[in-house]
Image: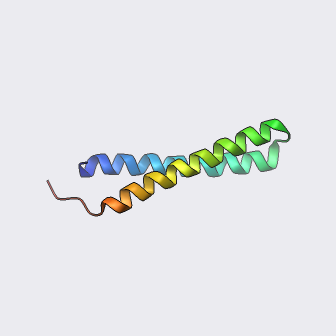
Amino acid sequence: MTPLENMWFSFIGLGLMFVSVVLALFGKSKLSGILRFIVMSFSFVCLVIAGIITFIIVIQGPTADY
């Protein structure tokens, strides 16, 4: 992948982390019951996907200059 693609891919990971935190805070403070479970589950899925994206970017290492 090019450095520009890596940048956008990492921004997607950061965005998913932000969404995960916001959903977790909202779910814990405002919701209850099955809706809370659904929101917290979606938050966890976002966090896992963001972690996988971060892992991929870090493992690739530095990119060559073009």
At x 37%, y 56%, the residue is 57
Nearer the observer, 32 or 29: 32
Residue extending farthest left: 66
**Residue 53 or residue 32, whichever sits in front:** 53
Which residue appears at 85% of the width and 39% of the height?
A: 33
In the displayed structure image, the side of residue 46 where residue 66 appears, left or right: left
Marks counted in the figure total 0
| Residue at (58% x, 51% y) in the render | 47
- Apparent side of residue 3 relative to residue 50 in the rendered image (left or right): left
**Residue 31 located left or right of residue 45:** right
For the residue pair 12 and 37, the one nearer the viewer reads as 37
> Where does residue 28 sit, x and y in percent of width and height?
78, 50
Residue 40 screen position, x and y as percent: 71, 45
In the displayed structure, 60 sits above or below 16; it is below
Q: In terms of depth relative to the viewer, which is nearer, 25 or 46?
A: 46
Residue drawn at point x = 64 percent, y = 52 percent: 21
Q: Position of residue 20 (x, y in %)?
A: 61, 48
- Horizontally, is 10 left or right of 63 in the view? right
